[in-house]
Amino acid sequence: MANIDLYGIKLASIYNKSIFRCIKTMNKILLLFLFAVFTLNSFAQKKGPDTVYTGIYITSIHDIDFKQKEYTVNFWLWLKYKNKDFDFMQNLEVPQAKTVTKSFSSLDTTGSRIYILMKLQCVMKDSWKIDRFPFDRQKLRLSLENSQFDSKSLIFAPDTLGKHYDPRFTLNGWTIDTFKVFSKIKSYETGFGDEKLINPHSEYSSFKVSIGLERKALGLFWKMFLGMYVAFFIAFVCFYIHADNIEARFGLSVGALFAVIGNKYVIDSALPESTTFTLVDTLHGITLLYIFAVIVSSVYALNMMKKGDITKVNRFDKIASGILLITYTILNIYYIWHAVEINKE
């Protein structure tokens, strides 16, 4: 009996040790499982947004409308990415676009990457700097976003390989002096109705294009201001009309005055409203003041003519005409030169 009891005790001890080992092994497996779950969860949380490589090729920029503050741009756009949830065919957004027309699109899902190519025409709203018009430089801005995914899920990266435009056919009457493509995070101080957000703040990745334009201004300048200068010289001819011919002098001066005012209204009708004093305002204002000076000089010469001193009248006309012509020319050259030099900076 003693042997049997001893044998039973040994069996129980072996059994207990087996159970202990099983429990210990299960605990190790459980710990490894929990560690794996925690690691995968941490990796999923730290996983960054997917990258969309974006490229653009502009074929034309036209219909630049200063009055309506808009322009039209045609371009090819391609996007390369891996996340199949990025539906750019439906969720491509062009902020500040008045209209977006898609004329062609293709989708290639061969392999592990998605490739989209599309042809777009956008009528863009933009602001213009007209302080030095027509010697102005403008900057056109174009940006693209995905309306469904924010910057936590999607970021743009520019595809800079190759050229982005053809300078021969892109734009008439202008020269493209700078062309930049880059990506940026754009902030919106709203949650777009998402109640999960504590703060009403959203961030979306944006693909941006910045195009610097310089106008070929010389021909346009003479086309717009030739009438103003002709009107001034018509008024200037008054100094070569005898002082007693008061009707001819005043008729030419007043006619020139209205011609300058009409010329300014024609130019202003093609430009947006501005609260600043532009080059157009400066040149027309100087011309109006000098035509008024011609009228005042004619009145003074008429008063001297009534006193019968013809010699003084002729000398006054000669001096006044020289002073007005020289100072008018200097002021015009200065303001035009100043506008051109600032434009080059």
Image (cartoon, helix red, strand yellow):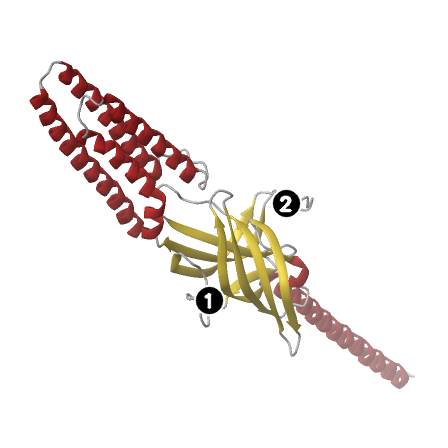
Q: In this figure, which residue is indicated by the disc labeled 1?
A: 164
Q: Which quadrant would residue 28 be assigned to in this image?
A: bottom right
For the point 18% across and 19% down, the residue is 302
Depth check, mark 1 against mark 2: the one in front is: 1
Q: Residue furthest right?
A: 1
Q: Which callout, 1 or 2, points at the residue further toward the start of the chain?
A: 1
| Residue 17 shows up from this direction | yes
Residue 68, relative to residue 155: is it above or below?
A: above
Q: Which quadrant would residue 118 be assigned to in this image?
A: bottom right
Q: Position of residue 178 (x, y in %)?
A: 38, 59
Quick one: SS at disc 1?
A: loop
Q: Nearer the viewer, residue 14 or 128?
A: 128
Quick one: SS at disc 2?
A: loop
For the point 46% across and 53% down, the residue is 140
Q: Position of residue 1 (x, y in %)?
A: 92, 84
For the point 50% across and 64% down, the residue is 59
For the point 32% across and 47% down, the residue is 222
Tag 1: residue type? His
Residue 26, relative to residue 338: is it above or below?
A: below
Q: CA distance from mark 1 to mark 2?
A: 35 Å
Q: Residues within 10 Å of mark 1 (few under 14, many from 20)?
A: some
Q: Is residue 289 left or right of residue 278?
A: left
Q: Position of residue 251 (x, y in %)?
A: 30, 26
Q: Residue furthest bottom?
A: 3
Q: Which mark is residue 274?
A: none
Q: Nearer the viewer, residue 200 or 43?
A: 200
Q: Residues within 10 Å of mark 2 (few under 14, many from 20)?
A: some
| Residue 47 shows up from this direction | no
Q: In this figure, which residue is indicated by the disc labeled 2?
A: 191
